[in-house]
Amino acid sequence: MKAAPAQGGVLIVGAGIAGLYTALKLAPRPVTIVTAGRLGEGGSSEWAQGGLAAAVGEGDTPEQHLADTIAAGAGLVDEAAARILCEDGPARIHDLLSLGVPFDTDEAGNLKVGREAAHGRDRIVHVGGDEAGATIMRVLTERARAASHIEVRERHVAERLIVKDGRVAGAVCWDIEAGEPVSVPSCETILATGGAGGLFAVTTNPLHAQGHGLVLAYEAGASLRDLEFVQFHPTGIDIGRDPAPLATEALRGDGATLHDAHGRRFMRGLHEDAELAPRDVVARGVAGAIKETGAAFLDARAAIGAAFPARFPTVFEACMAGGVDPRVKPIPVAPAAHYHMGGVLTDLDGRADVPGLWAVGEVASTGVHGANRLASNSLLEALVFGARAARAMPETVRCGAPADPPGFTRPSKPATDMAELRRAMSRDCGLLREAGSLGALLAGIDPEAAQTVGGRLARGAAKLIVEAALSREESRGAHQRTDFPEVAPPRHSLARRGGTMGDGAV
């Protein structure tokens, strides 16, 4: 097998916002990024519409942001991690400004801030209304391409981590263009592989976001935390597209309202904050409206109306492509798998509990989201903890001799025939769960029966999520068990290879 070591001894797996920002922050240390696609194309970061939450508005403070983050997280937020997120947030926004990200400003040149669910103040910064993810990705991609210390290997799919003497020592990748495996030895390996929404039938994520990074870390001996907490966005645009386009929460922040098929505004009877209730509450409200009346709609005609194309161009384009003009008609919506709060357990600097392994972005569990992510905290988490990981990275490491990489046991191809599993995950491990269906689902998932490496990794991630959901016998945040509707004493779930799903102290 060909070996191509990571320059500077640092390998980053994934080229979304978390991976690119971390790489830029590592300057001038050389670093190698491997990405399955082309740089700047097709990742979840690129699709993020909402924006970034940070205490940059007049009268807002990190303490207020922290209080909202803790409240939304349903008892499982790590306060130390969340405090870092909220206190470092404004600096990361200004860092992006210095890199060239054109956040929306008012006539006086001040940052415009908007409101989203469960935030007590206006604190969401946007780009072009709903183009934050795509714009930040474009700017970071341009900066990464121009950075002399960053080497990007496109069309390289990470299939396994290399472990030597209990330490992660790089990764084995499949070079799609060359059609051959390549060993990438490294001293430090950073996972920035994104989420797992592609495991569900209705998702706002790219379909290839199937939790591969979770399994790579798990098989290398790392601990995973709180995998059962999958956040469903309340307003995927229900026009039959897969993945589903997203109707950003900023629409509700600007006054758009939710109605059932009979025109009834149902959220006012479910939560005092109505459409701006925490996401899990709104998602269940939308699902209930669909179950009871056959459909749910987001009505932005009065709140936004003719200004829709200018204020929310991405949503407008998606709606029009699906035959819905949101200026004159309500938008059909349905909950969609959107964000994974669980992930690779890390410390406050992004270190996993296996030497040589780090995780940043959605694949990581830093503790800031708890059981239910506060809107627009996710991109901020990628920036804040990506910067911390870069600062904490050892400048020199004695890597030793390159490890012997593991061989391939099946074709190195993406997951195939995933439709049945995706439907089952949405049905049995979606918004509402119970032991019988979770157990039946778990019994039917066999990662080793997959025909490809991608299939094995995807099914492995699904199995880990279902095991965690079956283990948590309570309802908390985004995890709702119909057979255990009450809240139990707060605890984390932990999974590590060779053990069983266990408890972790809060």
Image (cartoon, rainbow, N blue to C red):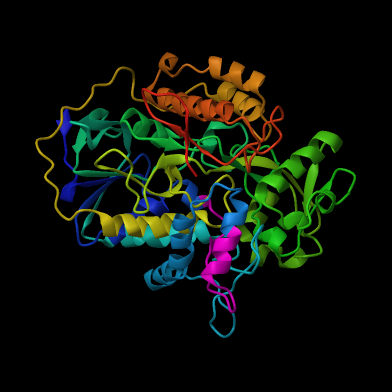
Nearer to us in this view, 171 or 357: 357
Q: Work out whether residue 504 can be spotted.
A: yes
Q: Where is the N terminus found, in terms of image quarters?
A: top left
Q: In the figure, residue 63 lies in which quadrant?
A: bottom right
Residue extending farthest to the bottom is 108
Q: Residue at x 30, y 60 (%)?
A: 24
Q: In the figure, residue 222 lies in which quadrant?
A: top left
Residue bounds of the magenta highlight: 47-68
Q: Is residue 495 magenta?
A: no
Nearer to us in this view, 322 or 118: 118
Above or below, 206 against 82 in this view is above
In the image, residue 481 lies at what x, y percent? 67, 31
In the image, residue 467 lies at what x, y percent? 52, 25
The reply, left or right, for residue 483 in relation to residue 135 is: right
Above or below, 24 against 347 in this view is below
Q: How many marks?
A: 0
Q: Is residue 54 magenta?
A: yes
Q: Residue at x 24, y 61 (%)?
A: 27
Above or below, 382 against 155 in this view is below
In the image, residue 120 lies at what x, y percent? 66, 65
Q: Work out whether residue 21 can be spotted.
A: no
Above or below, 177 against 450 in this view is below
Q: Residue at x 73, y 41 (%)?
A: 284
In the image, residue 109 lies at what x, y percent? 53, 82
The reply, left or right, for residue 44 in relation to residue 430 is: left
